[in-house]
Amino acid sequence: MSFTLLSVGGTMSTNLVSIDVNNTVYDAAKLMKEKAIGSLVIKNGDATEGLITERDIVCKVVAEGIDAKEAKLEGYVNKSTENIDQEDSIFDARQLMLDKNVDYLLVQKDGKLVGIVSKHDLLKD
């Protein structure tokens, strides 16, 4: 299937990086640095639990003085993630981000996770 630049599928990242919910926040931060990405999909087995972002780590862990090496991801997973279909427009994606005050959307095809799109992705040429 081909996508236009105006569809979420044409803009999304399909290089999903995930980490198990039983890992620590430190492990997540280290993986983000290694992969040069701003978010991770949190998994519990095959199930997607949600996301953790750089901002989540800074605001919920570091700024609160919590030891990232001791803090399990389970307590910091952003479970209120929003989904969008890969065929929806980037304009719909941006509006959903504004309406829900989120920086990332999980992209689905037929109910299956196939990618992620960030507000920064929508600003690219």
Image: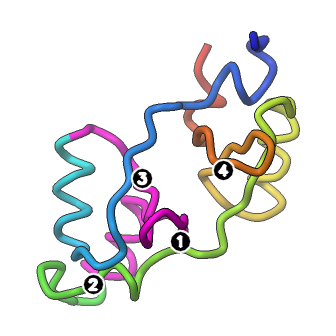
Q: Is residue 31 left or right of residue 5?
A: left
Q: List x then y, in percent, for residue 21.
A: 36, 75
Residue 2, located in which quarter of the rendered image? top right
Vertical relation: 2 (above or below) 15: above
Tag on residue 49? 1
Label 3 sits on what residue type?
Answer: Ser
Circle 2 is placed at which residue position? Answer: 72
Q: CA distance from mark 3 to mark 4?
A: 11 Å
Q: Is residue 85 left or right of residue 121?
A: right
Circle 4 is placed at which residue position? Answer: 105
Q: At 42% across and 68% down in the image, what residue appears?
A: 45
Neighbour tally class for label 2: few under 14, some 14-19, many 20 plus, Cα within 10 Å = some
Vertical relation: 125 (above or below) 61: above
Q: Are marks 3 and 2 in contact (CB under 8 Å)?
A: no
Label 4 sits on what residue type?
Answer: Leu
Circle 3 is placed at which residue position? Answer: 39
Vertical relation: 97 (above or below) 44: above
Q: List x then y, in percent, for residue 9.
A: 71, 26
Neighbour tally class for label 3: few under 14, some 14-19, many 20 plus, Cα within 10 Å = many
Label 1 sits on what residue type?
Answer: Glu
- First in residue order: circle 3 vs circle 1: 3
Which-is-in-front pick, marks 4 and 1? 1
Q: CA distance from mark 3 to mark 2?
A: 16 Å
Q: CA distance from mark 4 to mark 1?
A: 14 Å
The magenta stretch spans which residues?
35-63
Residue 74, located in which quarter of the rendered image? bottom left
Q: Secondary structure at mark 2?
A: loop
Neighbour tally class for label 4: few under 14, some 14-19, many 20 plus, Cα within 10 Å = many
- First in residue order: circle 1 vs circle 2: 1
